[in-house]
Image (cartoon, helix red, strand yellow):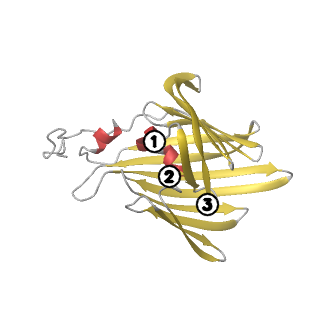
Amino acid sequence: MWMFLLGMAFAENPKQFLVYDLTLAGEPVGHRTMTISYTAPQGNIVGSRQIESMTEIEMIVAGQKISYQQHATATFTNNKTRFVSIVAVNDKRFELQGKSLSNQSWVIHEIMPSGVLKKEWGADEVQAISLALFDPGQAHRWKEGRQSFYHLEMGDVWSGEWHSSNETSISNNGQSIFGREIRYHANEGDLEMAWSTEGVLIDWQVQVMGLTLDANLRNLPAMPNFGEINVQRSFSGVQEEKL
């Protein structure tokens, strides 16, 4: 459905807004807000999803206070990704910038107080970034099997496997909707994720070093308002390519 809509022409960029309340051991520690913008193709510019994420966490771990802030933005098309992530941990800041290349390899710059470190990964080493998990246009990619992520939250790579992809009824604030639940296990930690049939990430949990950070979506987002959609004149249906 998303690919069909992105192939149309509409006047303004539709958006969705999501707010996740974060808890640690049942105690509120912060929140994460997301804005998802949908851009239609225009001329030589391909359609895309642009995601902006703001995260703030204040918590006590092993008797020490941890203050974490992150502001990340990413642009996703069918075959390319660009991102910027600015992170502050107890007022120590660093920045991550990267993009995927045409061969699906990655070039990422980690900008630290000590200097800039350029890293490169092949398509077999990193397949996606963590912010892609919030992109409705890519929800179909997360399924049984091995996959590696570059985490924009701290600048590390998780390599693990997806397990137990189940179609199920998912509850959000007392409202049940049909969706899919799946788990991801890596040596660095574990993820439990749930997507609606529209590809919206409606529930997620991160387990790292014995700690469980749980996210609860405040309200299910409304479907983006695409306004009046006009099929482009060049659109004449699906045609088979000659082999």
Residue drawn at (29%, 49%), measured in percent from left and top? Answer: 40
Mark 1, residues whose alpha carbon is within 10 Å: few (<14), some, or many (≥20)? few
Residue drawn at (32%, 41%), measured in percent from left and top? Answer: 3
Label 3: which secondary element: loop
Using the image, determine if residue 111 lies above or below residue 164. below
Would residue 63 be found to the left or right of residue 184 on screen? right
Where does label 3 land, which residue? Answer: 155
Residue 141 circle label = 1
Q: Measuring from the top left, give residue 103's x and y in whole percent.
A: 39, 60
| Camera-nearest residue between 213 and 109 | 109
Q: Are the two marked residues, 1 and 2, in contact with CB atoms closer than 8 angstroms?
A: yes
| Camera-nearest residue between 157 and 60 | 157
Using the image, determine if residue 95 lies above or below residue 205. below
Where does label 2 land, which residue? Answer: 128
Using the image, determine if residue 114 lies above or below residue 149. below
Q: Measuring from the top left, give residue 235's x and y in whole percent.
A: 16, 43
Would residue 12 be found to the left or right of residue 17 on screen? left
Q: Quadrant of residue 6?
A: top left
User: What's the residue type where badge 2 is placed?
Assistant: Ala
Q: Earlier in the sequence, mark 3 or mark 1?
A: 1
Q: Earlier in the sequence, mark 1 or mark 2?
A: 2
| Camera-nearest residue between 107 and 83 | 107
Q: Measuring from the top left, give residue 7's x and y in whole percent.
A: 26, 44
Q: Earlier in the sequence, mark 2 or mark 3?
A: 2
Using the numbered discs, state the Cα–Cα distance from disc 3 to disc 1 in whole angstroms: 22 Å
Using the numbered discs, state the Cα–Cα distance from disc 2 to disc 3 in whole angstroms: 13 Å
Label 1: which secondary element: helix
Q: Which residue in the rendered view is the most extreme toward the bottom?
A: 115
